[in-house]
């Protein structure tokens, strides 16, 4: 029997030779149906590909059996997190719904509230929120935050050590001999971006190098928003010899802008990113970067959510994972002055 698109409960009853009420009893595991008949109904349900309404299921049981993963948009960072989230949910009796809440050119403040208002209660039982923008919100269902915009102690949170990671990256450039190091910063409203800029400042300060405000430009985490600031940093007579970018995508765009200006990476310019998404190793000039354990962050966030749903709660409501330096081909020692 072929799978039937949009099969209804009536189709199942007709194919199984039973009443609609019998099919309903089988779906909801009620008494009054022989095992032989129930098995026949289940076989027809599988053959037709019938699925009962999530909304109707939630009204009956107060649970949908679906967990949400809410992101502003699907991009390499969130995609890597999703891999770990999916692994943790496997075999736990839940389905996953990945939902992108971005409605315009830039994610808007409170996008996760609007998304949860559409989904919570009738479609999902709980959610992992990737880079939520507001703190202290009443989400109505169990939620766990991944890399939140603001430091929020009201909900369980998983992130990485952005401050130490930035210090590690800039310190590596200093060890290579670079002193004129620029930063292509992330979004000013994002907590992780603020910590990465602070790490940049800390590393230069520890080396006794004064901060040059003109060498800090906001790239905004997106290649399109990074183009103009990257060009402003590199198309000047006193250009930097190295750039620390707040994420891999803007670091890659910096290399592209450098090439357009006739600069070679790493011979003329060293570039380091942050995240270690797949693009970093696959780019034509493999990118030196600060790796976040994205898969592990996603896995732990989902484990926390499952613990909330079980009523046990996470042992550690706030977990910050270590970052690490991955050296590739976009960085090199500063050439000696002629």
Image (tube, grey):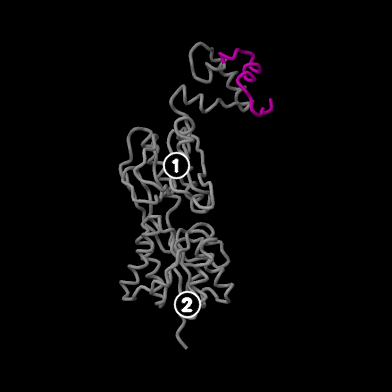
Residue at disc 2, secondary structure: loop
Q: Which mark is residue 118?
A: none
Q: Residues within 10 Å of mark 1 (few under 14, many from 20)?
A: some
Q: Is residue 11 magenta?
A: yes
Between marks 2 and 1 in the image, the one whose residue lies nearer the viewer: 2
In the shown orientation, is residue 49 left or right of residue 132? right
How far across and down, in percent of the image, does residue 145 sit? 39, 45
Quadrant in the picture for the N terminus = top right
Residue that carries the numbered disc 2 in the rendered image: 239
Q: Residues within 10 Å of mark 2 (few under 14, many from 20)?
A: some
How far across and down, in percent of the image, does residue 302 sit? 42, 42
The outermost residue toward the right is 2
Q: Earlier in the sequence, mark 2 or mark 1?
A: 1
Q: Nearer the viewer, residue 76 or 139?
A: 139
Residue 166 in the image: above or below residue 122: below
For marks 2 and 1, give the CA distance. 46 Å
| Residue contact at pointers 2 and 1, CB within 8 angstroms | no
How far across and down, in percent of the image, does residue 280 sit? 52, 61
How far across and down, in percent of the image, does residue 114 sit? 46, 40
In the shown orientation, is residue 7 left or right of residue 338? right
Q: Which residues are magenta?
A: 1-22
Q: Nearer the viewer, residue 153 or 321?
A: 153
Residue 19 in the image: above or below residue 189: above
Residue 7 in the image: above or below residue 76: above
Residue at disc 1, secondary structure: helix
Residue that carries the numbered disc 1 in the rendered image: 88
Q: Is residue 254 magenta?
A: no
The outermost residue toward the top is 32
Q: Residue at x 33, y 37 (%)?
A: 313
**Rendering quarter of residue 35:** top right
Q: Nearer the viewer, residue 129 or 87?
A: 129
């Amino acid at each position: 029997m072929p799978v039937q698109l949009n099969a209804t409960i009536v189709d199942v009853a007709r194919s199984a030779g039973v009443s609609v009420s019998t099919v309903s009893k089988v779906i909801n595991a009620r008494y009054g149906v022989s095992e032989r008949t129930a098995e026949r109904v289940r076989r027809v349900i599988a053959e037709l590909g019938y699925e009962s309404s999530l909304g109707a299921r939630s009204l009956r049981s107060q649970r949908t059996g679906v967990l949400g993963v809410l992101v502003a948009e699907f991009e390499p960072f969130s995609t890597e997190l999703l891999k770990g989230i999916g692994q943790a949910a496997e075999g736990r009796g839940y389905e996953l719904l990945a939902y992108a809440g971005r409605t315009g050119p830039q994610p808007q403040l409170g996008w996760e509230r609007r998304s949860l208002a559409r989904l919570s209660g009738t479609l999902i039982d709980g959610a992992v929120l990737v880079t939520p923008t507001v703190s202290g919100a009443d989400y109505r269902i169990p939620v766990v935050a991944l890399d939140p915009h603001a430091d929020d102690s009201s909900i369980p949170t998983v992130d990485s050590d952005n401050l130490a990671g930035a210090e590690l990256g800039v310190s590596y450039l200093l060890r290579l001999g670079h002193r004129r190091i620029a930063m292509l910063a992330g979004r000013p409203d994002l907590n992780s971006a603020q910590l990465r800029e602070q790490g940049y400042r800390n590393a230069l300060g520890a080396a006794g190098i004064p901060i040059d405000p003109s060498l800090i430009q906001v790239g905004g985490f997106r290649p399109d928003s990074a183009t103009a600031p990257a060009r402003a940093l590199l198309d000047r007579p006193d250009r930097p010899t190295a750039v620390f970018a707040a994420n891999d995508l803007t670091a890659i765009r910096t290399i592209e802008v450098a090439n357009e200006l006739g600069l070679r990476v790493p011979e003329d310019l060293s570039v380091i990113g942050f995240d270690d998404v797949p693009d970093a190793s696959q780019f034509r000039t493999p990118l030196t970067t600060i790796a976040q354990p994205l898969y592990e962050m996603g896995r732990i966030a989902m484990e926390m959510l499952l613990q909330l749903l079980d009523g046990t709660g996470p042992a550690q409501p706030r977990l910050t994972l270590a970052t690490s330096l991955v050296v590739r081909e976009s960085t090199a020692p500063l050439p000696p002055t002629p």
